[in-house]
Image (tube, coloured by chain):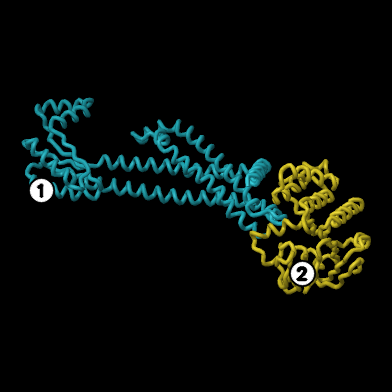
Chain colours: A cyan, B yellow
Amino acid sequence: MFTLLKRIIRSGWLNLKRQSGLTFATFFIIVMTISLVTFLFLFQGMTQFLISDLKEKIDISVYFKKDSAEEDILEVKEELNQNPEVKNVEYISREEALERFTQRYKDNPILMEALAEVGENPLLASLNIKAGQASQYAAISNFIETGPFRNLIEKIDYRQNREIIEKVFAISSNINFAGIAFGLILGFIALLVAFNTIRLAIYSSREEISIMRLVGASNWFIRGPFMFQGIVVGIAATLITLLIFTIAIFFLSPKIEVLLPGFNLLSYFGAHFWILLLIQLTTGIGLGVISSWIAIRKYLEV
Amino acid sequence: MIKFQNITKTYNPNAIALEDVSLEIGKGEFVSIVGRSGAGKTTLLKILLAEEKPTRGRVFFDGQDVCKIKKGELSQLRRRMGTIFQDYKLLSSKNAYENIAYVLEVVGAADGEISRDVFQVLEIVGLSDKARNFPQELSGGERQRVVVARALIHRPDVILADEPTGNLDPYHTHDIINLLLRINEMGTTIILATHNKGIINSLGRRVITLEKGRLIRDEEKGRFIL
């Protein structure tokens, strides 16, 4: 068994060296395929981040009348918290609202002047409500409008923002779907190209395979070296792809962070390193081994 | 040991390679099959090697029906044969040494045994200095000698030699035939397909004559008559 394995490996290694042109072509195609898979993985990560970031930004605010007591508002908050559709409720008092406002517009002298002119705090206390899903905002808004505490409420900004909210959710789910569909199509094409390259490589050995059969070699003894070549090329392609991506991400990460604030590609890459490596290895080795397996089968019929 | 039973092989209605051929070859025999080109000599050997299936009839090797052997077990049968192919069938990605060693690797010989035997057989066929040459770097005659070496290296029960001297000069022809005779003396069955009149007549062994796919003559101590 050990001798057999040793001979298979030696034979596979010799073939790799002697057919270096063919080996390189296969290697190149597998690198391309793994790169595409890796790119799709990272792209998926970015879209997920973008979508959840957009969702984070959506909320509805309920503004309370100036004379509402804080404990009444907190009671409303408590009530909303018990609603299963509500994910999170944040209370912003009038003072806090003013503070946020001045913090945000401290560089805008016109607004600051206007605020000073008013003399007192013109801002209202509010509750910031986040729902689990976009479709629930309408229900929550309805619940507040018809609830027992509706007299306390000055306004709800859901009605004004409704269109934007719904559009954002529609776009994000479209991006998600398009990303997956696009990825699947590209991945399929890449697999097909890689499979055909390997098939052509083995096609050039078809005569050798039939000779091996005729001199009494078992199917495993014939298949083995090809499988070994598939594994070696797969691993080498994975390592090279990984190296290329590591370098590229290292330099691109800051630029992507400018486009997508809060998303650090390098740390995303680092956090998903092992799963990505596993995907790459599975793609590389799987392609090499399975394609060889299928391609050889035909020539073992002798 | 080998029994062809009413073998017919047709490729299409107009191309009949073999027609109702029956013959038996005993263990240790040296049998020559003669006939013109296209008489069916090679087809007969291919059927024994299970490279081709007969259209009708059966072939037995040591009582085993060759046509009924499963694909997976075919390799066991072929290891008991050594074949000298007319068109060489050398592995182009392996050099002369590796081509011969491959058969020993297939049968699971030890590494030491392989290198000892391969160098020995290369010397016998006069190719010691060409061990590292690839088939495309060898002449026709040299390739043929590598094929001969590959066919006998693993001491098979039977050697199927299809025109083993087709590309050899008279000097090497003589050597190869003598080699086959020596191997035959050690008990290996030899089936030699050829249209070399001189060889057949000098051998004085059993001769089977095929003509247009039919067996027309089977004589002990036969001669080349066409």
Measuring 84% from the left and 71% from the top, which residue is drawn there?
B211
Q: How many labels does the image show?
A: 2
Q: Name the residue under label 2.
A: B4
Please tell me in which quadrant of the rendered image residue A228 appears: top right
Amino acid type at circle 1 is Gly
Amino acid type at circle 2 is Phe
Q: Can residue A296 be seen in this view?
A: yes
Quadrant for the C terminus of chain B, please: bottom right
Image mark 2: chain: B
Q: Residue A57: x percent and y percent?
A: 26, 39
Measuring 77% from the left and 47% from the top, which residue is drawn there?
B135
Numbered mark located on residue A147 in the image: 1
Secondary-structure class at tag 1: loop
Q: Is residue B53 left or right of residue B131?
A: left
Secondary-structure class at tag 2: strand
Q: In this view, does B201 lie to the left or right of A201?
A: right
Measuring 53% from the left and 43% from the top, which residue is drawn there?
A32
Q: Residue B181: x percent and y percent?
A: 87, 56
Measuring 71% from the left and 47% from the top, which residue is drawn there?
B109
Image mark 1: chain: A
Q: Please name whichever residue, A123 or A283, is drawn nearer the observer in this view of the structure.
A: A283
Q: Please name whichever residue, A155 or B185, is drawn nearer the observer in this view of the structure.
A: B185
Q: How far apart are marks 1 and 2 (CA)?
A: 99 Å
Q: Can residue B168 be seen in this view?
A: no
In this rendering, the answer to whether B1 lies above or below B112 is below
Q: Residue B173: x percent and y percent?
A: 89, 53
In this rendering, the answer to whether A277 lies above or below A173 is above
Q: Please name whichever residue, B109 or A255, is drawn nearer the observer in this view of the structure.
A: B109
Q: Residue A43: x percent and y percent?
A: 41, 42
